[in-house]
Image: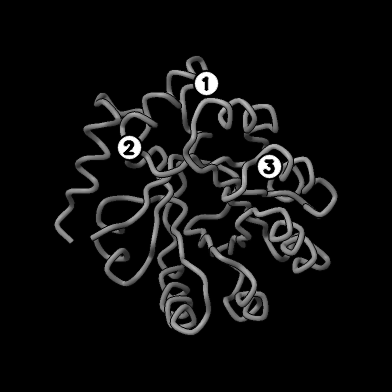
Amino acid sequence: MQFELMASMMCADYRNLEKEVRELDEAGIDSFHIDIMDGRYVPNYAMSLNDLKCIRSLTDKRLDVHLMVEHPINTIDLFINSLRRGDTIYIHPEAEYHPSTTLQKMIYAGIEPGIAINPGTSVEYVYEILGIVNKVLVMSVNPGNAGQMFLPYVGKKYDKLLKYKKYMNFDVYWDGACNAERIKTFAPMGVKGFVLGTTLLFGKEKPYKDILRAIRSLDI
């Protein structure tokens, strides 16, 4: 079964960022997931615009930029102008007065429009804009920090979204506490891709190539 694997770069070794990117690229990662936090929408800071630009210059693979910021409309052009056509930007709808306006700016620029759904945000809340996004990133943990515990009730969101997916043009992705069992459960249901952090990918004493090969070889 084919599914996408994205590297959560906030979990990478920043002492050797270029080495990390090149090894992940050569190992066959599908895309690089960039978490941007403003210290207000979430109580933390993560990667910067300069980190994004650095990674963009080091790989031809797609970048998936997850904006955990208040009112992304105010800075969206900075990110659009740092990306290539076909890259993705996710925003949190509840962080924006008019999320459809921000998403439309991405569409005009050739950026894949996406939304991220927090554990405490209902699918019904975002239903109206599902028709204009290409990707939905479902958070299985509260956003802001790596290494959090999985929140089991989030699984019900996938059931709803995958039903809507049948007549709307979007794909569903997993972010947070992603382990092998969750890939084995949710990939056959229709989840297209998984963001990999410290649970499966980073901080292991194995080459990235071996880790990714093992994940793609799961008995699904």
Amino acid of disc 2: Gly
Residue lying at 52% horizontally and 21% vertically, measured from the top left: 14
- Snapshot colouring: one colour
**Mark 3 crowdedness (10 Å alpha carbons): few <14, some 14-19, many ≥20:** many
- Image quadrant of residue 151? bottom left
Kindly report the distance in space between the C-alpha atoms of the residues bearing marks 2 and 3: 27 Å
Which of the marked residues, 1 or 3, is nearer the chain's N terminus? 1
Residue lying at 64% horizontally and 53% vertically, measured from the top left: 111
Q: Position of residue 18 (x, y in %)?
A: 49, 19
Q: Is residue 192 left or right of residue 220?
A: right
Tag 3 secondary structure: strand
Amino acid of disc 3: Met
Q: Nearer the viewer, residue 61 or 94?
A: 61
Residues at discs 2 and 1 in contact (Cβ within 8 Å): no
Which quadrant holds the C terminus?
A: bottom left
Residue carrying label 2: 28
User: What count of labels does the image hold?
Assistant: 3
Q: Is residue 152 left or right of residue 164?
A: left
Tag 1 secondary structure: helix
**Mark 1 crowdedness (10 Å alpha carbons): few <14, some 14-19, many ≥20:** few
Residue lying at 71% horizontally and 56% vertically, measured from the top left: 106
Residue carrying label 1: 14
Tag 2 secondary structure: loop
Residue carrying label 3: 37
Kindly report the distance in space between the C-alpha atoms of the residues bearing marks 2 and 1: 20 Å
Which is closer to the viewer, label 2 or label 1?
Answer: 2
Q: Among all residues in the image, which is located at the extreme left?
A: 219
Which of the marked residues, 2 or 1, is nearer the chain's N terminus? 1
